[in-house]
């Protein structure tokens, strides 16, 4: 069941989204060689708590940390650890915060120092594919038109879309209907309605789209060992342009 948010619910989600955005801003100076992903997790948790919110991911279905920290060939759900970032790494930081009973959810992939041109292209294409998709996040459009636009842009640039995981609705629950695949056929899927809140999140692999899950039950990696990138925002469908609740600059 898809939940349509009222204006008061949308306001609560804006507050959650602002905290997620602020968490990224707090983390940016620390994404550098020599920092452990556990240290990044601690910084994020302390910032979220300082805003009167709680980390959405902590203990969610048993997840043991406040953020997902996915390095290089880790697609999603990387568990923060004592491993240190190295020059040339890329890292996807996925962050959720809940306040007043409503969630915000977003992800960014960062470069650690100087990275290869191909790694930078992967990050840039993943981010832009999100923006290609949300051109269609409008009242009256079909959901899979977003999916098709993401897929077309990614594959046109020589990368592949992860099939096994997708975006989702969001609100009182971190994951709500509808599921939002990052591939599909334009003109299909449910019709979008003003007040829908969607976490749209392209997950893009440098090589093939096949993935594996490690023994910890969480960490998802590319099957061929290639790099992966991830970009996500919580998006509110409006009468006109979609509103990005987790990116205050756009």
Image (cartoon, rainbow, N blue to C red):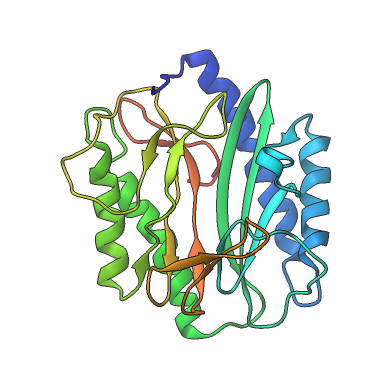
Q: Is residue 68 left or right of residue 41?
A: left
Q: Quadrant of residue 202?
A: bottom left
Question: For this rendering, which residue is in front, 222 or 143?
Answer: 222
Q: Quadrant of residue 71?
A: bottom right
Q: Position of residue 11 (x, y in %)?
A: 56, 21
Q: Is residue 212 left or right of residue 196?
A: right
Q: Position of residue 161 (x, y in %)?
A: 36, 63
Could you tell me if residue 139 is visible in this image? yes
Q: Residue furthest left?
A: 187
Picture layout, residue 248 above or below residue 41: above
Q: Position of residue 66 (x, y in %)?
A: 74, 47
**Residue shown at the point (28%, 29%) measured from the top left:** 192
Could you tell me if residue 57 is visible in this image? no
**Residue shown at the point (63%, 36%) measured from the top left:** 18
**Residue shown at the point (73%, 40%) measured from the top left:** 59
Picture layout, residue 237 above or below residue 183: above
**Residue shown at the point (29%, 33%) measured from the top left:** 138
Q: Quadrant of residue 109?
A: bottom right
Location of the N terminus by quadrant is top left
Callout count: 0
Picture layout, residue 119 above or below residue 16: below
Q: Residue furthest front?
A: 215
């Amino acid at each position: 069941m898809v939940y349509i948010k009222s204006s008061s619910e949308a306001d609560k989600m804006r507050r959650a989204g602002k905290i997620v955005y602020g968490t990224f801003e707090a983390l940016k100076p620390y994404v550098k060689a020599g920092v452990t992903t556990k240290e990044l997790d601690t910084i994020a948790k302390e910032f979220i708590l300082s805003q009167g919110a709680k980390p959405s991911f902590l203990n969610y279905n048993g997840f043991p940390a406040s953020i997902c920290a996915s390095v290089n060939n880790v697609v999603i759900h990387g568990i923060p650890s004592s491993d240190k970032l190295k020059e040339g790494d890329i890292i996807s930081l996925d962050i959720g915060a809940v306040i007043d009973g409503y969630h915000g959810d977003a992800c960014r992939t960062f470069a650690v120092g100087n990275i290869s041109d191909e790694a930078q292209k992967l990050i840039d294409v993943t981010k832009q594919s999100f923006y290609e998709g949300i051109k269609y996040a409008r009242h009256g459009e079909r959901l899979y038109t977003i999916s098709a636009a993401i897929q077309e842009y990614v594959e046109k640039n020589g990368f592949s879309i992860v099939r096994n995981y997708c975006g989702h609705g969001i609100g009182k629950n971190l994951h709500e209907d509808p599921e939002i695949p990052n591939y599909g056929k334009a003109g299909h899927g449910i019709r979008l309605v003003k007040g829908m809140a969607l976490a749209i999140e392209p997950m893009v692999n440098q090589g093939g789209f096949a993935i594996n899950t490690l023994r910890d039950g969480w960490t998802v990696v590319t099957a061929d060992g290639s790099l992966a990138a991830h970009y996500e925002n919580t998006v509110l469908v409006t009468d006109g342009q979609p509103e990005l609740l987790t990116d205050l600059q756009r």
